[in-house]
Image (spheres, grey):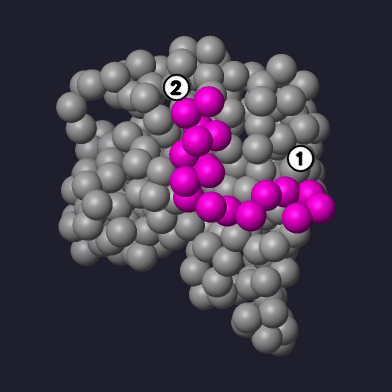
């Protein structure tokens, strides 16, 4: 990725990122931390869209393994992402940011329907725009939703927040000898079977020349460093 000014990003947050020290739900301390990190880049005139997962509440694939119909489980997971989106919206608004939540499912009493042109207009006006309910379809992860929304809103960069600082050859939380990649191609990521993001999301990014940066969510000011062009985590392109 060329060191050009980043004007618009799509931030992908997992539902698990909101857990903090809890086993279930949302940790208010994590919301405060995330809100301040996001505000730092909005204050630097970067437009930001957010896609949030729902794994801290429900994960469709996991529910299917327990016997629930996969489509029903995925729909439950989509609703969980809406809950998380509203929590993040509240935290961001307490930082005096203007926020809109858009949903791929119709829940008009709590958020707007996702309409691409309207989403881009929100971003152009400096509003943090949260995309919830994934793609609105079962069998697609929120990673795939993140790549899709990033392409649709013409983001300069997709940023994936994880528990480790980038992409490794193996899970570094399990094997401390795992190799860290400062940069890796889409094809190598896929051929090596790396699981930081699902294959569908990587293929979509490749086909649309969308660079992805993976970083550790717990590193203070990492988001700001990334939008300033610093080499944080791993770049996939």
Q: Residues within 10 Å of mark 2 (few under 14, many from 20)?
A: many
Q: Residue at x 52, y 75 (%)?
A: 139
Task: Estimate the spatial distance between the alpha carbons at disc 1 and disc 2, rounded to whole Å.
Answer: 22 Å
Label 1 element class: helix
> Residue at point 59% right, 19% down?
39
Q: Which mark is residue 87?
A: 1
- The picture quadrant where one finds residue 207 is bottom left
Left or right for 98, reference 125: right
In this rendering, the answer to whether 191 lies above or below 217 is below
Residue 210 position by quadrant:
top left
Q: Is residue 33 visible?
A: no
- Bounds of the magenta span? 108-125
Q: Residues within 10 Å of mark 1 (few under 14, many from 20)?
A: some
* Residue 212 visible in this rendered orientation of the protein: yes
Q: Residue at 66%, 32% (x, y): give it.
A: 99
Q: Nearer the viewer, residue 228 or 125?
A: 125
Residue farthest to the top, as pictured: 43
Q: In the rendered view, would you say 72 is above or below 1?
A: below
Q: Is residue 117 left or right of residue 36?
A: left
Marks 1 and 2, the one that precedes in the sequence: 2
In the image, is residue 175 part of the stretch drawn in magenta? no
**Quadrant placement of the C terminus:** top left
């Amino acid at each position: 990725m060329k060191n050009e000014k980043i004007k618009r990003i799509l931030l992908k947050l997992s539902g698990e990122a909101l857990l903090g020290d809890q086993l279930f739900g949302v940790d208010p301390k994590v919301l405060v931390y995330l809100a301040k990190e996001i505000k730092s880049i909005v204050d630097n005139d970067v437009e930001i869209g957010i896609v949030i997962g729902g794994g801290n509440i429900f994960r469709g694939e996991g529910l299917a393994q327990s016997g629930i119909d996969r489509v029903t489980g995925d729909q439950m997971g989509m609703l969980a992402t809406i809950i998380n989106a509203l929590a993040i919206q509240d935290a961001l608004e307490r930082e005096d940011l203007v926020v809109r939540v858009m949903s791929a499912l119709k829940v008009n009493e709590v958020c707007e329907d996702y309409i691409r042109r309207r989403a881009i207009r929100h971003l152009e006006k400096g509003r943090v725009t949260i995309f919830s309910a994934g793609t609105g379809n079962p069998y697609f992860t929120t990673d795939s939703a993140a790549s899709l929304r990033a392409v649709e809103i013409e983001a300069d960069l997709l940023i994936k927040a994880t528990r480790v600082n980038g992409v490794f050859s193996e899970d570094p939380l399990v094997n401390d000898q795992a190799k860290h990649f400062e940069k890796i191609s889409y094809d190598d990521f896929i051929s090596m079977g790396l699981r930081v993001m699902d294959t569908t999301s990587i293929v979509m990014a490749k086909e649309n020349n969308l660079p992805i940066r993976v970083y550790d969510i717990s590193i203070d000011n990492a988001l700001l460093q990334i939008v300033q062009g610093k080499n944080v985590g791993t770049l996939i392109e």
